Image: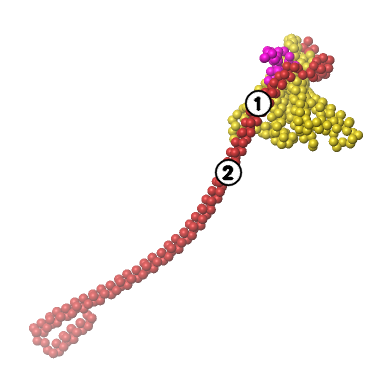
Chain colours: A yellow, B red
Amino acid sequence: MEELILAAAPCDLSESAVCAPANVNELFEFRETVYFVFGLPITRTVFLIFLVAAFAIALFYFGLRKRSTQPGKFQLAIESLMTFVRDDIAIGIIGPTGIKYYPYLLSLLIFILIGNVFKITPFINLPVTARMAIPLFLALLTWVIFVFAGFKRNGFSYFLGIVWPPGVPAALKPLVGVIEFFSTFFVRPFSLAVRLFANLVAGHVMLTLLLTTAFVSFATIGEIGLVKGAFGFAWWALGLSIFMFEIIVIILQAYIFTLLSAVYINTSVNAEH
Amino acid sequence: MLTHVFAQVVLAQNAELILAQAEGGGGAAFLLPVPEELFAGIIAFSIVFFFVWKWAIPVLNKTLEARQAAIAGELETAESAKVEAESLLRDYRQQVAGAKDEASKILADARDAGEAVKGDIIARAEGEAQQIKSRASDEIAAERERAVAGLRRQVADLSLVVAAKVVESTLDADTQRDLVDRYIDELGGVK
C-alpha cells in the first residue's frame, strides 16, 4: 500500500492502513528543508509558493506571446481575465484612478487563484493560501496600499474622516470613530487574511477527511466486512461532491479577496464619498 | 492493530480527533506565518507583480491597440467597399435602364426596318409581277403578230397555189367564186 498522506510522519504500513497525522497542522506543514537557495530553506511549501509564481508568469506569457489580433481561445481567456480585472474591478470599483492599482489587483487575483487551485491539483493537493504566511502578507500589502493611498490623496483628513466621521451625530462620533478606527486599521487586514485562510483550510481538511476515510474503508474491507466497507463509497461520493464545491470556493475566494482590496482602496482614495 | 488504526481514523470520527489534537498541540502554530514561507511569498508575489506590471499589461495594451486599429481599418475598408458597391450598383442600374431603352429602340428600329423591307419587297414583287405580266402580254402580242405573219405567208402561199391551180385549169365563174369564198372562210377561221 502506497503512502497516502504525505503530511504524516512515516509509519509501519504493514500494521496501519494509513499514516494518520498527529494533528491538523501536519496536513499543511512541510518544514523539512529539501535544499537551500541563497540561504533560503526550500521546503515543499516554499517550492509550491515559487511554483505559483512560475505558473502565473507562464499563464500570462503563453496567453499573450502571440499578440494575435485574432486571438485563440487561450489568449481570449487571458485577455478576458485581464480586462475583467481592469474594467470591472480596478476602474469599476475605484473609478478612473483605479487604473493605477490594476497591476496590483491583477497580480493579486492570479496569485491567489493559482495558489487556491493547488488544492485540487493532482500530485500537489496543497493550497499555498492555506498557509497563513500568504494570506497575511497579501492582506497586509493591501492594508499598506490603501492606508498609504488614503493619506497621499486626502492627507490627514483621511485619518480624521475615520476617527471623527462626518455625518454622524456628535454624541456618537467618539464611539463610531473608535469602531471605524479598529475596523479600518485592524479588522480589515485581519478579516481579509482569515477569510481566505479559513476557507482554504476548511476545504482542505474536509477533502482530506472524506477521501481518507473512503480510502481506509476500501483498504480494510477485508477486516471490517463488506457492509461497513460499503460506507466508504458514500464518503468517497461525498468527497467528490465537495471537490466540485471546492472549485467554486477556489474561484470565489480569489475574487472576493481582490474585490475587497479594491473596495478598501476605493474607500481611501475616494474618502469623500 | 489495523483495526485499531481504522477505529482511530474512520469510526472514531477522525475530524474530532484531528481537531482535538489541533487544539491540544499545533493549533496556535498553525495560525502563525512561517518565516521562510512569508519570505518566499514576498519574493514570489513581487516577481508576479513585476512581470504583470512590466510585461503582461503593456503587451495586452499593445495587442488591444493593434486589434482596435485592425478593426478600425477593416471597418474603414468595409465602409469604402460599401460605398464602392453602392456606386457600382447605381452604375449597373443606370446601365440596365439604358440597356432597356436601347433594346426598346433597337426593337422599334428593327420593327420599322422590317416594315420598310417588307414594303420594299412587296413593291418590288409587285413591280416584278407587273413586269412579268407586261412581258407576257408583249410576248403574247409578238407571238400573235408572228402567227398572223405566218398565216399571211401561208395565205400568200396558198393564194399562189390557188392562182397556179386557177391558171392551170379553167375555172368557171361559180367555181372561182366558190373557191374564193371558201378561201376567205378559211382565212376567217384562221383569224
Q: What kind of element bears circle 2?
A: helix
Q: Chain of mark 1?
A: B
- Taking the magenta stretch, the answer to whether it contains residue A43 is yes
**SS for callout 1:** helix
Q: Indicate the position of residue B69 as horizontal and vertical percent values.
A: 59, 38
Label 1, label 2: how many angstroms apart (C-alpha)?
Answer: 36 Å
Give above or below for B82 relative to A12: below
Which residue does the numbered mark 2 point to in the structure image?
B76
Residue A235: quarter of image: top right
Label 1–label 2 contact, CB within 8 A = no
Circle 1 residue: B51
Amino acid on which disc 2 is placed:
Glu
Based on the picture, tell me whether residue A166 belongs to the magenta stretch: no
- Given the current orientation, which residue lies at the most extreme front position? A156
Is residue A257 visible in the rendered structure shown here? no
**Closer-to-camera residue (B106/B182):** B106
The spot of residue A218 in percent (x, y) is 74, 18
Residue B96 is labelled as: none
Residue range corresponding to the magenta coloring: A29-50
Q: Earlier in the sequence, mark 1 or mark 2?
A: 1
- Amino acid carrying mark 1 in the image: Phe
- Residue at image point 82% right, 14% down: B25
Front in this rendered view, residue A268 or A116? A268
Seen from the viewer's position, the closer of residues B186 and A45 is A45
